[in-house]
Amino acid sequence: MTPRQHRPRRTRVGTAATALVVALVLVGCTSGDDAGTSAPDSSPTRSSAPVTAEPGPGPVAATTDTAAVRVADGAEPTDVVTGLEAPWSVVRLDTGSSFVSLRDSGRVVELDASGGLRDVATIEGVVHEGEGGLLGLAVLAGSPSYLYAYATTADDNRVVRAPITGEPGSYGLGPQEEVLTGIPKASNHDGGRLAFGPDGMLYVTTGDANLRDEARDPDSLAGKILRLSPTGDVPTDNPLAGSPVWSMGHRNPQGIAWDAWGGMWAAEFGQDRWDELNSVSPGADYGWPDVEGRSSSGDTISPLLQWSTDDASPSGLTAVGSTLFMAGLGGEKLFEIQVPAESEATPTERFAGDDSLGRIRDVLPGPDGTLWLVTNNTDGRGSPSAGDDRIVSVPLEPVE
């Protein structure tokens, strides 16, 4: 029997009330990692009401152009910034600055338009152990604008937010608020990606935290993609009434993205056999731990693409038009994936064997038709070179 493949959805999922970045990505942990801790309470926690202030910075808006792009022929990566300590997530602002999360220290740093770095704040309560720490970031524009962060604490993984203060070159953060607490934590399989979707809702990827059987349990927050309002409420149109669960059966997704048609994608770390690229639908079950990679089971959704775990180990994911770009940690390469509407996705490997890059943690659209790659050789699994870790820029060009 031919494995069932879930094809990308080509209808928009909604319209955001404000300009929102699609902070794109997924999947991230390697096989053979240590066991995790038990799951804490998984009840969602709402934040307090927003603070009144002048409008602040917003994320760079995602493109709605459906044209396919590719890394330009002969492109060589050029440094945007060097000397980062275990960077995990980057979000670009419409003011020209960017925020970067540093996993181990819990620090958020500002990267200005000229490549300068300065500390913004340290997220309270971050405890680094293994793959845990300060992970994904997202920004919501408004009065004020908010920085959202996915953080590992002594007790759990959680989503917090803080109002953004100041201006380019002097950004800071106001009082920190809880958005969602009680996500299971472990020394690995922590998920950690945050992104605002085209519908204005906050999406959160969570790993199974080595609680394998809870990935398919709708009452657990482990091994899921979650969907929340910006203040942490459960949207009334979620697939499970009163639950933040958007999809389940995930092992360790660390990248989510939306293409120009509104189709949602996720990248996911496998265990011993297959890493995955999945097209995500509300309420769908992706099978882990009973299924890894493609399956003929009618109860679960098979990935659109799969790779051996030695070849990919995917983390960040982004979309530029109809092209997806997926960061490879263990594979030490960038995957360029064309997703036409009526045919199979076509992946191309970029920078494979480029010793100047090594592990690639995140990928996102850069300015002026470029793509930014975030290396991760100082995260305890790589072999750092001089200048690591770095954000590098590569030019894109249209696909003829």
Image: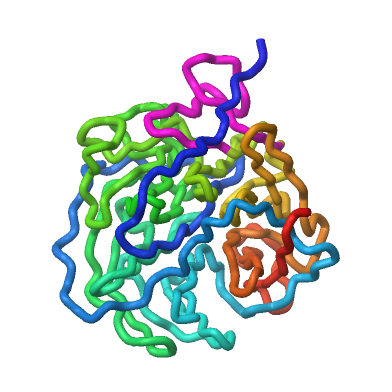
Question: Compared with residue 131, is residue 145 higher up or lower down, i.e. above or below?
Answer: below
Lateral position of residue 145 relative to residue 344, left or right:
left
Residue nearer the viewer, 12 or 312: 12
The residue under the point 45% across, 76% down is: 94
Residue 116 visible at all = yes
Residue nearer the viewer, 215 or 201: 201
Lateral position of residue 77 relative to residue 203, left or right:
right
**Magenta stretch holds residue 325:** no
Question: Compared with residue 25, is residue 374 higher up or lower down, i.e. above or below?
Answer: below
- Of the 4 image quadrants, the one containing the N terminus is top right
Q: Which residues are magenta?
A: 278-307
**Magenta stretch holds residue 305:** yes
Q: Position of residue 115 (x, y in %)?
A: 58, 85
The residue under the point 51% across, 35% down is: 9
Residue nearer the viewer, 142 or 86: 142
The residue under the point 51% across, 14% down is: 298
Q: How are the colours assigned in the image?
A: rainbow
Lateral position of residue 109 relative to residue 376, left or right:
left
Majority secondary structure in the magenta region: loop
Query: Hey, which residue is sitting farthest top in the picture?
Result: 1
Q: Position of residue 14 (x, y in %)?
A: 36, 47
Q: Position of residue 211 (x, y in %)?
A: 41, 34
Q: Position of residue 105 (x, y in %)?
A: 45, 71
Q: Quadrant of residue 170?
A: bottom left
